[in-house]
Image: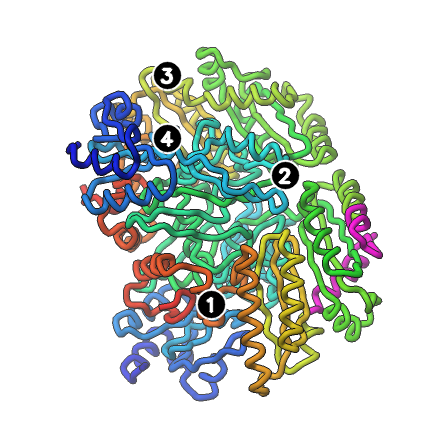
Amino acid sequence: MVDRETLKELIQIVGRENVLTSEVSLATYMYDATLLYGKPDVVVFVENAQQIASILKLANSKGIPVTPRGAGMGLSGGTVPNRGGIVIVMTRMNRILEIDAENRVAVVEPGVTNMELQKAAAAYGLMYAPDPASQKVSTMGGNFGENAGGMRGIKYGVTKDHILGVELVLPTGDIVNIGGKWEPILPELNLLSLLIGSEGTLGIATKITVRLLPLPRAVKTLLAVYNTLEEAGNSVSQIVAHGIIPTTLELMDNKVIQAVEEWLHIGLPLEAAAVLLIEVDGWGPELDRQAEKIIEICRSNGAIQVQLARDAAERDNLWLARRAAIGAMARLRPSYDLEDATVPRSRLPEMLRRVEAIAQKYRLPIGMLAHAGDGNLHPLVLFDERDQEEMERVHKTREEIFRAALELEGTLSGEHGIGLGKLDFMPLAFTPIELDFMRRERRAFDPKGILNPGKFIPE
Amino acid sequence: MRPAFIKELEDILGPGQVREDRETRQAVALDPEALPDAVVFPQDSEQVARVVSWAGKEGIPLIPWGAGKHAFRGLLPLRGGIVINLTGLQKVLEFDQDNQTAYVEAGLSLAQLKEIFGAGRLFLPLDPVEGEACTLGGCIASHASGPRKLGYGTIKDYLLGLEVVLPTGEVVRTGGKTVKNVQDYDNTRFLAGSWGALGIITKAMLKLKPLPEKEVTMVLGFNALDEACEAAYTLRKEWGPVALELLDSRTLTALENIGSPLPGEGKERLVVAFAGFAEAVDWQVDQVVARFGSRARINIYTNTEAQAVWEARRKAFAAFSGEKGGLLGQVSLPFTSTGKFITEVDKFISSKEVKAGIVAHFGNGHVHVFIEHPPLAYSEVRGFLAGIEEQALKEGGLFLVDNVGDLEDIRKKVENRGSALLPLLKRIKEALDPKGILAPNSKAIAYALSPRG
C-alpha cells in the first residue's frame, strides 16, 4: 500500500533515520497491550506538528491509512495498524512546554507520560488529576485520545474534565488550535469535547493544554475487609449516599487478594471475599468526621476489619495491594484480558454477581478489580492464548460481560475505549441511526477515512 | 404562514399548539422588526421529531426555544421561520438518588429541578445570572454557568447523556448513565454550547451533587480596586472558594440606583462563597477573616441573607441595560493578569464619558464590562470598545461583545486559530443538518456559514 514514491516522500519529511521498514521494526509496532495485532507498512518517528501535517497531507492525497501511536499501552487495539499503512510514533514529542503554576495550567507535547507531568506539577504543589493505572508509561496523547480514567475518577473526573485546549493536526493535514488556556468566551462549537476520547479518528494532538489542581492539603486512607462482595458493594453506595465523595473507592475480590498475598506477603486475609481501599481528601478539618463516618458505614455493612492509615508509610502499604493487583494476577496464567465494563454505582453488586456466574459457566478464572465509586469494573480474565478451545470460552465470556453491563444501564467501555477490541459489540449499544450519526461526524473531519480506519465506529 | 402549513403542524401537535398571533411571535423575537412566522408548542420528543422532519421536508428554519433568557446572547435576530418552544417537555423520567443521577426533559426550569432534586438532598450546581426560570435545555444549548463555575464548573460537567432530535428528525441518545463512559464520541458535551445548531436537546441524563452541608457567603469591602484585586488573588490561591466575584464601585452605585443594592459595606467589593463540610467551611471563613479583617469590611451571610446577596449580583447587567439596553462585554484572561486588567480598565472608564461598570468572575479570569448603550447602535461606542479590547490583548486576553451580531469579529477570532477551522465547522454543520434548517441564526456556527463580508 505504501509505495516507493511514498517512502521517498516520508524520508524527505522526517529524514531517513526516522523511517523504519525492516521486518523486525514493523513487528515491534504491530501491537498494543491487548492480544490484537496488525502489521504496518512503515513506521515513522516525528518531532513536530509540521511533520505530522505533511505526512497527513501525503496520506490524505493517496488514501493511505495512518495510525498514531504513543506508548502502545492501549487496552482496546486503538494503536494496532490493522489496515497496514503508516504508524506515526509520537514518543519523541516529549517536552513539557510550560508549567504555569500561578495560573494552574500546563502545556505538554503528546509524548510526555502522565507520570512525568505529575512529577513536574508536584514540584509546584499541583497535580494533574487523571491518573490511569498505566501512568508511568502511558502518554498524554494516548490519555487524550482515549479519555483515560483512573482511580480518582469519582471525585476528580476523567481526562475530559481536565483538558483546556489542544493543537491538532486534522486528517486533511491542517493544523488548528482548539480551546485554550483561559475561559472560553467565543460562541463556538465545543469541538474539544468531541476530540477527547475520539481514539485518534478525528485528528492527532500535537500540544495539549491541561488544568492543574492544588494537591489536597490532607488525605485519609482506609482499608475495609469483607466476607462477601455484596457487603463491599453496598458500603460503596452508602458512603456516597451519605454525601461523602471519596477520592478513591477501589474494590478487589478474593482471587485478586490471594494472588497479591501469595506474591507480596503483606498480610491480607486470604479468606476475605473483598477488600475496599478508600481514600478521602480535602482541607483537613473535615476529614476526621468523614473517616469516622466511613468506618461506621463499613462496619454496619458487615466489614470484619477496617484499618485507618496513621501515616504516609501505612498509607503506602494499604495502596500496595491495589498497585500490585494486575501484576499479581498476570503471574497466574500465560495471558489475561482486562475489560472495563461500567455500570451505575448501585448496580455494581449485581454486576459482580453476574460476572461470577459467567466465570463459572465458562470455567475461567476471573479476578475482579473495580473503581467501585464509578461503577467501573475491571474483570481480569486469565487464560492461555494457545488453547483454541479455551479462547472460544474467553470470547463468549467477554460478550456476556458486555451484554450484562448494557442490561444494567452501563457501557461497553468506561475508560479503555472501543478500538478494534469492542467494535463488534457496538451494535449492541447503539441504534443504526446513532452509528450513522457518528459516521457522518467522522467523515466531516476525515472525508477520505485515513485516520485509524476500521476502528471505534463500525463502518 | 400558509394555511396548509398551519394545518399540517396542527395535525402533528394538536389545535392550540400552533400560534400565529403577533403577541406570541413578538415574545420570542430578538428584534421587534424580525418576527418568526409561527411558534409551535410540542409536548414530547416524538412531536419534536415530527416537527423537525416536517420542517426539513418544507425547508423551513426552526429555532429551538426555552425560557428565552439566554437567547439574546447566542442567537441572531431572524425574520421568518418557526420557533419551537420546548417548555412543554416537562417529564421527570427518573430520579435515581442512589446513583445521584436524573433523566429529565429539557423544558423543565432550574427552579423546578432544584425542588425535585432538593427533596433527595441533591442539586444541580448551576447558577446562571439569568436566573432559575431558565430551562435545562436552554442552559445546555447555551453552555450556561454562573458565579459558582469556579467551584463547580459549567452545565457540561453535569451531563452524562442526552436525547437529541437531529436536524434530520431522527432521535439519538448520546452518552449514558455512568461518569466513566467512552463508547461513543462525546456528543453529550459537544452539543453543550451549540445554540441549537446541531440538534434539539429533548432529554438529559444529569449527574447531581450532594447538597453541601454548609454554605457561607462573605462580602469583603475595600477602599481601592487594586486592594480588592490583590485580596481576590490570595483568596483563590489559598482557600478554594466556590465563587469569587468582584463588583466595582460603579456597578455598586448602578445597583443602588435600580433599588437593588448589594448587601455589605465598602467601596469596591468581593463576593465570596464557600461550600462543603461544616468544619472545612468554618476553617475557610476563619482564615479569610484572620487575613483580611483589618483591611476590609467583612460581612458574613448564610441562607436567605446570602440569597439576597446573589440576587443583587444577578441584577448587575440589568443595572446598566435598563430601558435602552446595554452591551455585555466579556474578557477572558490569565488569572494572574485579571487584577491588572481591571485596574487599567477602571482608569480607562474614568477617562471616558461612557457609563460602564466592571463585574468579574475573578477566580476564572473572566471579566464583564457592562456598558449602558443600546446594542443595535453599538457602532457609536466602537472607540470605547476598542480601548477595552486593546487592554485585554495587552494582558494576553480576549475581548468580545456578547450581545451584538458582529459575525466578522467572531470569524476573525476563530480563524486566528487555524484557517482550516471554518471549513471544518461548515462540513460538520452540513453533515448533521444537510438542509440547513436548524437554528441558522446560531452564533456558534453562523460565522462559518455566511459568506465573508
Examine the structure image and report whether residue B347 is included in the region drawn in magenta. no
Give the structural element (helix, strand or loop) at label 4.
Answer: helix
Look at 79% across and 59% down and name the residue there: A226
- The first of marks 3 and 4 along the sequence is 3
**In the depicted view, which residue is nearer to us: A305 or A443?**
A305
Does residue A225 appear left or right of residue B281 in this picture?
right
Examine the structure image and report whether residue A302 is included in the region drawn in magenta. yes
Mark 2 vs mark 4: give the one in front.
2
Give the structural element (helix, strand or loop) at label 2.
Answer: strand
Q: Amino acid at mark 3?
A: Gly
Circles 1, 2 touching at the beta carbon (< 8 Å): no
Mark 2 to mark 4 CA distance (whole Å) = 41 Å
Q: Which residue is mark 2?
A: B210
Q: Chain for mark 3?
A: B
Mark 1 vs mark 4: give the one in front.
1
Marker disc for residue B322: 3
Does residue A415 appear left or right of residue B75 in this picture?
right
**In the depicted view, which residue is nearer to us: A159 or B257?**
A159
Which quadrant, please, contains the N terminus of chain A?
bottom left
Mark 3 to mark 4 CA distance (whole Å) = 22 Å
Q: Quadrant of residue B241?
A: top right
What stretch of residues is rendered in magenta? A296-325
Mark 1 vs mark 2: give the one in front.
1
Circles 2, 4 touching at the beta carbon (< 8 Å): no
Q: Amino acid at mark 2?
A: Pro
Circles 3, 2 touching at the beta carbon (< 8 Å): no
Q: Position of residue B335 (x, y in %)?
A: 51, 39
Marker disc for residue A274: none
Q: Which residue is mark 4?
A: B388
Q: Position of residue B76 (x, y in %)?
A: 27, 34
Labels 2 and 4 positioned on one and the same chain: yes
